[in-house]
Image (cartoon, rainbow, N blue to C red):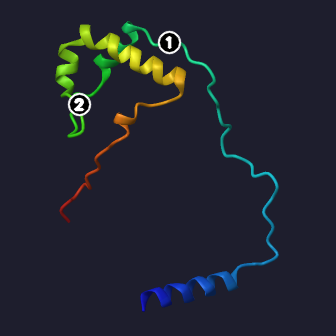
Amino acid sequence: EFSCYLQDKIVRIREGLDSSWVVPGETPMARPVTLWEEFDPVTPEGVDSLLGKLSTTTCLLDLCPFWLVVATREATCTRLQGTINASLSEELFPAALHEAVAHPALHEA
């Protein structure tokens, strides 16, 4: 029943469209697109500086708690530097890090 209603609604919308409308050959963009083709490698000092500025919150998908990463900066900076530089040079992000968890924010009315 709902699918019939939805199909009828789509047909009515299509009938109401102006059939003489033509898509322009070139659509102007709101902002120019910047394509980065090369990156300066990240340094251990840059990674250390960035770690010092980040929020200390932790997610369920974190491989280890952020406080542990910060506490072991000397050991983790070079690994993070290697991962970041490899991601930038190969234009790939590690597949194991492609996950996220989203929780809806519920507010009382």
Q: Which mark is residue 14?
A: none
Residue 64's place in the image compared with 49, above or below, is below
Q: Relative to 30, is 40 on the left or the right? A: left
Could you say where residue 99 lies in the image, as x and y percent from the top left? 34, 42
Place of residue 75 in the rendered image (x, y in percent of width and height, measured from the top left):
25, 9
Q: Residue at x 42, y 8 (%)?
A: 43
Q: Residues within 10 Å of mark 1 (few under 14, many from 20)?
A: some
Taking the spot 54% from the left edge, 13% from the top edge, the residue there is 40
Q: Which residue is mark 2?
A: 63
Whole-angstrom CA distance, mark 2 to mark 1, is 24 Å
- The residue lying toward the viewer, choosing from 63 and 105, is 63
Q: Quadrant of the image for the N terminus?
A: bottom left
Tell me the residue that label 1 is attached to: 41
Which type of secondary structure does the marked residue at label 2 adopt? loop
Hey, what amino acid is under mark 1? Pro
Check contact, mark 2 vs mark 1: CB within 8 A: no
Residue shown at 22% from the left, 20% from the top: 69
Judge whether 104 appears above or below 76 on screen.
below
Q: Earlier in the sequence, mark 2 or mark 1?
A: 1
* Quadrant (top left, top right, bottom left, bottom right) of the C terminus: bottom left
Tag 1 secondary structure:
loop
Residue 47 relative to residue 106: left or right: right
95 and 61: which is toward the camera: 95
Answer whether residue 20 is visible to the viewer in this image. yes
Compare residues 28 and 81 and report the one nearer the observer.
81
Residue at 33%, 14% (x, y): give it.
Answer: 79
User: What kind of residue is marked 2?
Assistant: Leu
Res. 37 image quadrant? top right
Question: Splitting the image into 4 quarters, where does residue 48 fall?
Answer: top left
**Vertical comparison of 99 with 9: above or below:** above
Q: Does the image show residue 48?
A: no
